[in-house]
Structure formats: C-alpha cells, structure tokens
C-alpha cells in the first residue's frame, strides 16, 4: 500500500504543470523561489570561454571565474615554457662557446693566410671567396696550430683548419726519416732501435706519421689497435646550434617544408595541407606558413647557405656548324671550406698522411698494409711540394652517366665530390660529410649519322674536358686533386685514350693491345707530358693525329693538365665493379648459367628460383625471389647474386 501511495503522489506532482497550463520548470522554480521571496528566470545561455550551458542569472559570475581560470592556466604554461627555454640555453651555453671558438680559429687561419698572400703580392680573393684570378697563387700558412677541444669532451680536439703539427721544431727533410732499410722490398722493413724489438709481439701495429708532421710513431698490440678510438661515438648537432633549423622561422616550419619536398607535393597539395593544419590548430601551433610561397621563400633562404649551382653555356664547333650545351656546376672550394670549418665534422678529419705497419714475429719485419686513402703513398708523396707546416687536402671526384630514377628514363651525368681524409663511414654515407653533387655534365645526343665517327668522338672528348676544366678552375691554383675513380668508359674519357681497340688501350700504362694477357710483364706508365709534347709540335692535323694514334691518345687537350702537380693516369684506379661484377659475371658467367638452365627446361628454372626465394636473409646482401629470367640489373645486384648462385645451383645442376 505504501508503494502505491508514493507512486500516485509522484504522478500527481509530475502532472501538475499540465493541469495549470504552465511549463514544468517554470512552475517548479517559481514555487521554490516564491518561498525565498525572489524571482528567477529559467533562460540559459552558453559560456563564451568554455562553451557550457548556464543559467542567465549566474552566467556573469561563471564567465568571470572561467576567464580567470584560463588566464591562470595560460600564465602557468608560459612560465613552464620559459623555464624549459632557460634550461635549454643553460645546457647549450658551453657548446656554443666551443663552436664559436672553432669558427674563430678557422677565420684566424684564413685571415693569416690572406695577410701573408697580400704581403707577397698574391691573390687573396680566391682564399676568401673562392674566385680565382688568372695567374693567382695559393699561399699556405707555415704557422702550426695546436688542436683545440672546441666541441667535444673527453676526446682530443681537432681544429678544422689545424694541420695537426706540433709547435715549431727543427726542419725535417720530407723524404728522409732516417737511413733506408737494407731490405729492397719497400713493403717490408726491420724493426728500428726506437721500436724496442724485444717488446714487440706478433701482429703488433705501427702507425708511422710523415716526418713533416713531427709526430712520433705509435705501436699498439693487435687487439688494442683502433686508429679512430678518439672519435666520438655520436654527435648531436644541437650541441653546436641553439636553433639548427634556421633560416626557417621555427622547427615546425622546417619539418613541414622537408616533408613537402620529400613527398614531391604540388603547390595545390601544399596549400590544401596548410588549410587543414590552420583549421585544426586554431591558432595554437607555431607553424607560420600560410601559402606555398612562404615555403618556397624559406627554401630559397636556406639554399643561400650552400654553394648554388651555376648554369654555363658552352659552344663548340662541329663540322660546318656549332653545337651548344649547358653545364651546371658548383664552387668546389666553397664546399671544401664549409666542410673544413664544420665543427660537427672536425673530429673526423685526418689531415696528416700516415703509414701503417704490422709486425711479423717470424720474419722479424714490419709488413705494410693499407686501410684508408691517406695511408697510401699518394698523400705521403704530396708533402714534397708543400711548405713546412702545411698539409695536403685531397678530393675524390667521381663522374658516371646514369639514369635518374626520379625521372624514369631521363639520363644524368653527375660529378660527385667526396673528401678521402674524412672517415670512411662519413664520406661514403648519405648524410653530413657524404658525397656532394658538384656538377651535371652535358649529355650529347648521338644521331645515327654521327655514330662512331672520329669527329663525334673528338667532340665528346672536348665537351667533357672543357666542362671539367670549368669545374676544376678554382683548384687550378689552389691545390692538387687527390684521387679520381671512374668506370671503364669514364677512365678512357678522363685519360683521353682511344678505348679497348686502340694500340695502347690501358689509360694507366703503355701495354700493347696484344700483350694485355701476359700479366708477368711490366710496361712504363703513361705521363701527361707525352700528350703535351705531341700537341705542342708544329705539324699538320693529319701528322698530329697519326702520332697520337700510335700512343692510343686523342687530339684533345686534357683538362687535368692545367692543374699543377696532377697526373690523371696515376689518379685512375682499377674498375673492380664494372670489370668483375657487371662485366665478367653479369655479362658472361651469369648469362651462360641462364642459358644452361633454359636448355635444361622449365622445371630446373623453377627449382633454382625457388632456391633463391627460400635462401636465408643476410645483412647487406640483397635477397632475390627469381633470377633465371632476369635480363638486367645493376652491378651491385650482380655482385650479390655471384656470392650465392653457385651454392644455390649446386643441387639442381649436379
């Protein structure tokens, strides 16, 4: 009965507004407030700050409190951000000071060199701006500079421009480091008294520095040898720059622009993405871009930091007319100075030429070995032409025509610069210190009427060398080019030889064409002077062509002959990639294997493909699902196939 009563009472209360013909809420509030002697409206509105629904009577007090709360939260966030910035500035102060010191030392070195050049009447513009004037010479500082610990702790410092030589010492002859060993083999030598032979163990390693550096030899046990033990394991670029994203306004601007560049977004896509971001952030983000033009302007500002590509138009006579080609190139010296001054790269430079020796306890001899370009004789012998206190700076220049994957079948002819005195991991990498494209050579489109004609071949040689002469013009009076590598075609173009069918096909030595198979014979090396002597003779074009043909050379002046101290024939090296991987294996052995499998039938081909597909995956080794019908791939892929194909094919073909 009690339950029924409560239910009925509740129903009467809920239905009361209907009987009085009034809104339920108004009646309830009026009844409640009537007892308190006041009138309250039932109207509600939204708060302008938080968006909540509140009664009109109390809305003013709520909005005032809501505003104060939001302002308090804002002040708290700003204070937290300020504390974070203050902490960051405190952490970077020491690194910034070191970085500034590194730049100061580099500027002092160049300034001293400029003053000395001015005193001697030499050209100073090339040292400061990389703009050589005809006949200008490069002054070298003879003042040694001590390494400064500018950017790192717990490691020996490496000033980018420092030679690594100690303070001034008595002059040491470059080519004399004591009496020559009695052993006729230059790759072996007995232990010296200073080596303390009694304490040497088998496989000990000896690092011998060039006498001009004034640094004593260092001997280490084999298990302790680590030439780069003083290198930092990782380098944080933020330690050198408080805001490394400059000249972009914010870090977010740089990240956004980089993403757009990598994705290859069009102007319409960039602007659409910016609209979405601007609508989403509602004024709370630091992204300042508003249009594609802002992104483009920021990239233009960033590009001014690096040496820009310059377009050069070159015209050459051909038959009865002229041919015009475009060359795009960058200032090599400006790029070199930027790398030398970079405090991030400073610890990874090795300016001094060294020799490495390994102790053979059985023979009681030091056996020489090589592991970096600056451990060979090229850089070592360069000291004879350098004043005391100076060090050589070597360049790798690689040119190879290739297809640009980003443009389908479009071809490019890039010239890539690397610095062999940087650590191997850096110079062969894709990041800071890696390869830099310094030129795009013209590509001559060959027509059927020009194919294989002497005039066309001569034109290609002239265009190539005039283009390279322009790229290397700044080095003509600055330094020697260290080492150059190219594939078979590029090596013939660089040395201006006539190719594999000429009387003397080798671009390095004068081995006759019919004697190349006999590797036990030795022949004199080519020299730049032999071509220069023939070109300097007063004779008809036909007579000069005949003399050059006897030597396997072309009637073109070599661009490298204009650089003092450069021997292009010594700079060329054996082309292992094209000779073995894409040549001997890719063009011959692999094709013979494919032909054999095709003759055996489809079942054998399927078995070999299955063996390749199920082979284990190995680090730095490409994995293939099928190879029996592969028509073409690059030399690196051929190398990986050659490492595993004979083991994989053993079972099906045995």
Image (spheres, rainbow, N blue to C red):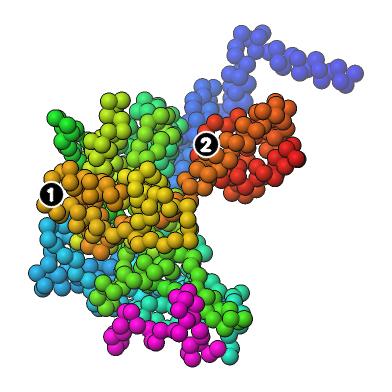
* Alpha carbon distance from label 1 to label 2: 48 Å
Residue 639 at least partly seen: yes
Give residue 586's position: percent from left, percent from top: 54, 40
Residue in the picture at 40% in, 35% down: 404
Look at the magenta stretch and give its main secondary structure: loop
Residue in the picture at 47% in, 81% down: 183
Compared across the picture, whether 532 is left or right of 381 comes to left
> Mark on residue 401?
none
Which portion, as a residue range, is magenta?
Answer: 168-197
Residue in the picture at 24% in, 75% down: 387
Q: What residue sits right under mark 1 in the picture?
A: 539
Residue 245 at least partly seen: no
Are dots 1 and 2 in contact, CB under 8 Å?
no
Compared across the picture, whether 526 is left or right of 22 comes to left
Q: Quadrant of residue 112?
A: bottom left
In the displayed structure, 528 sits above or below 251; it is below
Image quarter (top left, top right, bottom left or bottom right) of the N terminus: top right
Q: Nearer the viewer, residue 596 or 3?
A: 596
Residue in the picture at 51% in, 24% down: 44
Q: What residue sits right under mark 2 in the picture?
A: 633
């Amino acid at each position: 009965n009690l339950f029924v009563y409560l239910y009925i009472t509740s129903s009467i209360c809920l239905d009361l507004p209907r009987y009085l013909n009034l809104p339920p809420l108004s009646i309830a509030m009026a009844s409640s407030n009537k007892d308190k002697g006041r009138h309250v409206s039932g109207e509600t509105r939204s708060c302008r700050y938080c968006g909540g629904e509140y009664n009109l009577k109390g809305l003013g007090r709520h909005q005032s409190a809501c505003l104060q709360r939001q302002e308090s939260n804002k002040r708290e966030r700003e204070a937290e951000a300020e504390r974070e910035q203050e902490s960051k500035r405190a952490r970077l102060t020491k690194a910034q000071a070191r970085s500034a010191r590194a730049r100061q030392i580099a500027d002092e070195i160049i300034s001293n060199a400029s003053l000395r050049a001015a005193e001697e009447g030499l050209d100073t513009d090339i040292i400061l701006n990389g703009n050589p004037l005809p006949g200008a010479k490069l002054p070298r500082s003879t003042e040694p500079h001590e390494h400064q610990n500018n950017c790192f702790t717990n490691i020996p410092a490496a000033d980018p421009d420092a030679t690594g030589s100690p303070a001034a010492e008595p002059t040491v002859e470059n080519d004399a480091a004591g009496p020559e060993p009695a052993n006729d083999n230059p790759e072996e030598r007995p232990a010296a008294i200073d080596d303390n032979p009694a304490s040497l163990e088998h496989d000990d390693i000896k690092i011998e520095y060039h006498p001009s550096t004034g640094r004593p030899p260092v001997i280490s046990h084999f298990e302790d040898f680590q030439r780069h033990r003083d290198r930092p394991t990782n380098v944080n670029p933020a330690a050198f720059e408080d805001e490394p994203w400059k000249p972009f306004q914010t870090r977010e601007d740089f990240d956004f622009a980089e993403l757009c560049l990598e994705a290859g977004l069009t102007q319409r896509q960039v602007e659409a993405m910016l609209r979405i971001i601007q609508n989403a952030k509602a004024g709370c983000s630091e992204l300042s871009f508003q249009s594609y033009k802002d992104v483009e302007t920021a990239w233009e500002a960033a590009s001014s930091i690096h040496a820009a590509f310059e377009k050069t138009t070159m015209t050459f006579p051909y038959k009865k007319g002229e041919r015009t080609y475009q060359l795009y190139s960058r200032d090599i010296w400006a790029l070199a100075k930027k790398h030398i001054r970079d405090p991030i790269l400073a610890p990874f430079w090795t300016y001094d030429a060294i020799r490495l020796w390994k102790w053979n306890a059985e023979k009681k001899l030091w056996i020489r070995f090589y592991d970096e370009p600056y451990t060979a004789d090229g850089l070592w012998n360069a000291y004879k032409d350098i004043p005391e206190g100076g060090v050589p700076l070597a360049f790798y220049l690689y040119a190879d025509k290739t297809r640009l994957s980003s443009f389908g079948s479009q071809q490019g002819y890039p010239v890539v610069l690397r610095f062999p005195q940087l650590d191997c991991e850096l110079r062969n990498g894709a990041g800071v210190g890696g390869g830099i494209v310094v030129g795009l050579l013209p590509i001559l489109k060959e027509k059927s009427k020009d194919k294989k004609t002497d005039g066309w071949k001569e034109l290609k040689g002239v265009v190539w060398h005039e283009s390279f002469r322009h790229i290397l013009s700044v080095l003509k009076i600055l330094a020697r080019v260290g080492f150059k590598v190219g594939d078979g075609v590029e090596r013939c173009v660089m040395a201006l030889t006539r190719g594999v069918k000429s009387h003397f096909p080798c671009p390095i030595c004068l081995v006759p064409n019919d004697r190349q198979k006999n590797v036990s014979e030795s022949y004199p090396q080519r020299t730049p002077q032999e071509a220069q002597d023939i070109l300097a003779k007063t004779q008809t074009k036909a007579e000069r062509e005949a003399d050059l043909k006897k030597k396997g050379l072309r009637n073109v002046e070599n661009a490298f002959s204009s650089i003092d101290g450069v021997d292009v024939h010594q700079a060329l090296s054996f082309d292992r990639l094209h000779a073995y991987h894409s040549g001997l294996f890719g063009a011959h052995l692999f094709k013979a294997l494919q032909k054999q499998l095709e003759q055996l039938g489809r079942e054998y081909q399927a078995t070999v493909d299955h063996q390749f597909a199920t082979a284990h995956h190995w680090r730095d080794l490409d994995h293939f699902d099928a190879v029996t019908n592969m028509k073409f791939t690059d030399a690196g892929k051929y190398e990986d196939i050659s490492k595993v194909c004979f083991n994989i094919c053993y079972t099906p073909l045995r």
